[in-house]
Image (cartoon, helix red, strand yellow):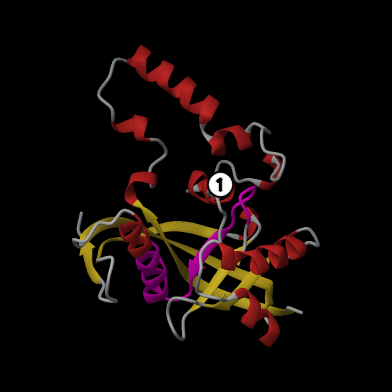
């Protein structure tokens, strides 16, 4: 079974597509104020994060989410947009804050999933994607996997089927009060990741640099360029 241990780490890295790194895409639209107001109301009625902040999500209450602090919307979005299949340590009902201790680990994790996207779309050329790096600090007790857990929960393929054991373990820990799980990166040998279950434990979320990441469906090469400005 996973064991509790101290995890004290400053400046962990979470890469978020730049398109989602603003409060709302509506901010950039050059439209009349009344049109923006109508679109904002529609967005509020259909946006999972905003619905959860109003109490519309049964798996995470408004009291767990962040308000009135820098990047609160970024943190809340991680927990309220879990994706149709969830992630390695969260199911499709409730998200988690995933981050790499090392920037290289976060890049490797992102690159892997972009390769899958290109393969699924049968796209042969190399494509580039822009990401914003969000830093966050953690200090507290988190769960660490034992040997049996690592063997069962850190399988690389197939996705999403290989997530079943890890999601079951995560749900058991989540509802027993766990803060989250620290584990070895599946996509980068020697890298370390964290899956934090509690928004309030994502300390001092802040923006760092932006990166352009280029990958192809086949091969392990990753092109990385820092975006200035």
Residue 100 highlighted magenta (yes or no): yes
Q: Is residue 68 above or below residue 142?
A: above
Q: Is residue 35 above or below residue 190?
A: above
How many marks the image carries: the answer is 1
x, y percentage for residue 197? Answer: 65, 59
Q: Is residue 88 visible?
A: no
- To which residue does mark 1 refer? 76
- The residue at the far right in this view is 176
- The residue at the far top in this view is 34
Quadrant for residue 115, please give it. Answer: bottom left
Residue at 29% x, 76% y: name it. 220
- Chain part drawn in magenta: 91-113
x, y percentage for residue 126? Answer: 20, 62
x, y percentage for residue 76? Answer: 56, 46
Residue at 55% x, 60% y: name it. 87
Question: Callout 1 environment at 10 Å: few (<14), some (14 to 19), or many (20+)?
Answer: many
Q: Is 12 left or right of 225, judged from the image as shown? A: right
Q: Is 139 left or right of 189, judged from the image as shown? A: right
Quadrant for residue 148, please give it. Answer: bottom right
Q: Is residue 6 visible?
A: yes
Mark 1 falls on what kind of element?
Answer: helix
- The residue at the far front in this view is 122
Residue 93 highlighted magenta (yes or no): yes
Q: Is residue 51 above or below residue 80?
A: above
Residue at 37% x, 12% y: name it. 34
x, y percentage for residue 226? Answer: 23, 65
The quadrant of the picture occupied by the C terminus is: bottom left
């Amino acid at each position: 079974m996973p064991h509790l241990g101290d995890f004290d780490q400053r400046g962990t890295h979470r890469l978020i597509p730049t398109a989602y790194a603003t409060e709302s895409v509506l901010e950039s639209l050059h439209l009349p104020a009344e049109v923006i107001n109508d679109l904002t109301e529609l967005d509020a009625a259909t946006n999972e994060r905003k619905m959860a902040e109003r109490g519309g999500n049964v798996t995470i209450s408004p009291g767990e989410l962040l308000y009135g602090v820098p990047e609160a919307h970024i943190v809340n979005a991680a927990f309220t947009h879990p994706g149709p299949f969830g992630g390695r340590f969260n199911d499709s009902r409730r998200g988690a804050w995933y981050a790499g201790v090392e920037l290289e680990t976060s890049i490797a994790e992102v690159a892997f999933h972009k390769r899958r996207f290109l393969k699924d779309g049968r796209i042969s050329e190399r494509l580039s994607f822009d990401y914003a790096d969000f830093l966050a600090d953690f200090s507290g007790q988190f769960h660490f996997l034992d040997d049996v857990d690592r063997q069962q929960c850190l399988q690389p393929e197939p996705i999403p089927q290989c997530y079943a054991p890890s999601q079951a373990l995560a749900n058991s820990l989540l509802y027993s009060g766990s803060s989250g799980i620290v584990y070895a990166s599946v996509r980068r040998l020697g890298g370390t990741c964290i899956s934090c279950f509690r928004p309030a434990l994502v300390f001092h979320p802040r923006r760092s640099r932006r990166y352009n990441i280029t990958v192809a469906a086949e091969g392990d090469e990753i092109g990385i360029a820092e975006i200035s400005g």
